[in-house]
Amino acid sequence: MSTKHRLDKAYNTAKIIPFDDDSKFILFSDCHRGDNSFADDFSHNRDVYVHALTHYLEAGFSYCELGDGDELWETQKFDAIFQAHKDVYLLLKKFHDAERLHMIWGNHDMVYKNPTYVKKNLSTYFDKETGEKVDLFPGIEYHESVRLEHITTKQILFLTHGHQADWWNYIFWRWSRFLVRFLWKPLNLMGVSDPTSPAKNHKELIKIERRAKKWISENNNTFTITGHTHRPRFPQPGNIPFFNDGSCVHPRSITGLEIEKGTISLIKWHVSANKEGILQIIKTTLEGPVNLNAYQ
């Protein structure tokens, strides 16, 4: 199965979401929410993430997570992740209850491609205070990809995790999971990085981006947004429209893409000190806003 076949399949089976210039979306990926152990990279940015999500919830944004939200390679059970970051999931629940939550699976949470697994693990949680099961994400669905289709201009934005261009982490994800869980996780303590991860292997990252751009070029320059590599991308109009929202595990910061008022921007939420030396969480626009129709 080639990169072309995998991306064609993801595009043709994508969940379709109509939108217009009044629509507002925040796109994050690669949160890698873990169990709050030494290996949980998300825990360092949890406060930043919660602050950002609270802002988007109150501002009426829809939340799109482009895969690898949950770290289910290093952590075997979702319940351990939920207990470590319960406040995060209760915040995501508010998006779900408002029908503003759209979830895509990646290689680290590829078990979510199984609707039975999703229903069993994500629909409810056990409330220790009441001793009863309580709704968490009832009826939630995970998809391999999403197509945002503009009602007026008919422009299509293709959203997927991006590991379709990474044959090892797509086809042999179970082997990768085994190696990460029992080999690279303990070796990480000694400073040894996983060579199969594009986020930690620059040569592999370049190959994956090259395959993705080739597919985009051969498909009428389809406006494509991915995650997976953790490297933010924001091409200017006239270049191949291959975007990447980055990740939520950068040192002391998270990056994402905002779609609002018919424009797209690359943003970063991070901790910064003001003139008085007081630490605060702020948002910085790294690129944009650029009109979406500039890429048509």
Image: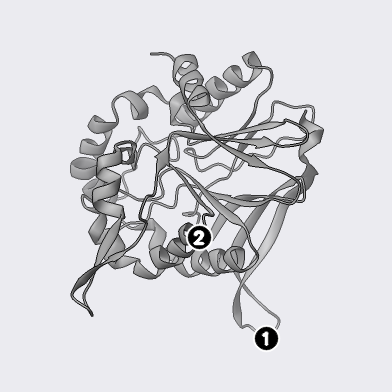
The x and y percentages for residue 11 are 53, 25
Indicate which disc, 1 or 2, sits on the residue closer to the N terminus: 2
- Three-letter residue code for mark 1: Glu
Quarter of the image for residue 40 reads bottom left
Q: Identify the element where label 1 is drawn.
A: loop
The x and y percentages for residue 241 are 69, 30
Q: Going by the image, does 155 lie left or right of 162? A: right
Res 87 visible: yes
- Three-letter residue code for mark 2: Phe
Disc 2 target residue:
95
Give the crowd class for mark 1: few <14, some 14-19, many >=20 residues within 10 Å.
few
The x and y percentages for residue 230 are 50, 43
Q: In front: 191, or 246?
A: 246
Q: Using the numbered discs, state the Cα–Cα distance from disc 1 to disc 2 in whole angstroms.
A: 35 Å
Q: In front: 98, or 158?
A: 98
Tell me the residue at 52%/67% (across/down): 48
Quarter of the image for residue 280 reads bottom right
The x and y percentages for residue 151 are 72, 37
Disc 1 target residue:
276
Looking at this rendering, what residue extends furthest in the bottom direction? 276
